[in-house]
Amino acid sequence: MRVLIRGAGVAGLTAAHELLARGAEVTVIENAEGFGRAASWYAGGMLAPWCERESAEEAVLTRGIGAADWWEAALPAGSVHRNGTLVVAQPRDGAELRRFAARTSGFRWLNAEEIEALEPALAGRFRQALFFPDEAHLDPRRALSALRQRLAARGVTFVAEEPDGRGAVLTVDCTGAARIGGIDGLRGVRGEMLYLETDEVSLSRPVRMLHPRIPLYIVPRNGGLFMCGATMIESDDAGPITTRSLMELLNAAYAIHPAFAEARLVETGTGVRPAFADNLPRAVRRESTITVNGLYRHGFLLSPAMAGDVAALALGEEIPRGDVL
């Protein structure tokens, strides 16, 4: 079976992986500018199905649980960090922490001493926290690059322009936000992020700080880099980060650790996340085209499961009802 995949973001690459594993001959059309225009380039890379359940449907939890295993198998050793997730709040926002706990599972409560043992840099900063030990994270940019390299080495063809189409028997559309306006009900949700660099803070896992107005997550990268995000604004504007968002993200980072005030701001970025009304993705086949879209803020978490759906649809298999998002 010859398959043409439009889009080389996280949805396209994971679909290519699953189709290749089932014997397909795969060609991927990637933007000439590389990953830089893909929303997945600006992702946090948190494989956190239990935390996401706080505001997402049960399907995000059930279908996202296997994501860390999938990425660990698909990427070079050491790419997936299974250090869990730490969720904190300032004492005045204790109600937010209790609300988060009431809506999630898979965690245990930590006191101040246990927080310090887990993350020494946060000693004396928080009285209570929730720790989700089974969650993981990865660096999206390294993951996308490594997966592309592995696919190319295994025979996937990457092209910058649309081929003549005479060879493909199936097309998989993974073009994400580019389809806003062309798919009924698909909308854009703007996310803004920044990268801070400092050698004064060391974290081993993502830290989420709850706040009624400006919740924040900080995800450690290599080399003293920290990805801070992310806003969720109902807009398909992909323009530069706004002053308001920049100040709010920086203020929240400072609240987690004051050393971030002296960090170097090395990058800001925005991405438009395609989403449906229920914020759940869909894979739909119509004749010789499969369309995958609506991954919202769950690209790295749900793309492995969606890629499995794509492969099933490509082979004419029925997706189990419990697996349909």
Image (cartoon, rainbow, N blue to C red):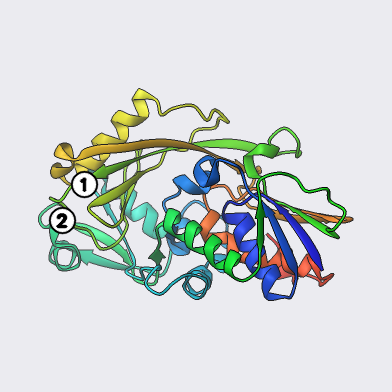
Q: Is residue 59 visible?
A: no
Q: In which quarter of the image is residue 171?
A: bottom right
Marker disc for residue 256: 1
Up/down of 125 relative to 255, above or below: below
- The reply, left or right, for residue 185 in relation to residue 318 is left
Instruction: Kindly identify the amino acid type of the residue bearing the numbered disc 2.
Output: Leu
The residue drawn where x is 59% and y is 66% is 151
Residue in the foreground of this view, choosing between 121 and 95? 121
Residue in the foreground of this view, choosing between 76 and 307? 76
Q: Is residue 101 visible?
A: yes
Quadrant the C terminus occupies: bottom right
Secondary structure category for the residue under label 2 = helix
The residue drawn where x is 63% and y is 39% is 177
Q: Percent position (x, y) of residue 35?
A: 52, 47
The residue drawn where x is 18% and y is 47% is 198
Secondary structure category for the residue under label 1 = helix
Marker disc for residue 25: none
Up/down of 131 relative to 213, above or below: below
Total labels drawn: 2
Q: Percent position (x, y) of residue 59?
A: 60, 62
Q: Percent position (x, y) of residue 98?
A: 33, 55
- The reply, left or right, for residue 233 in relation to residue 97 is right
Residue under numbered circle 2? 122
Instruction: Kindly identify the amino acid type of the residue bearing the numbered disc 1.
Output: Ile
Up/down of 241 relative to 24, above or below: above
Mark earlier in primary sequence (1, 2)? 2
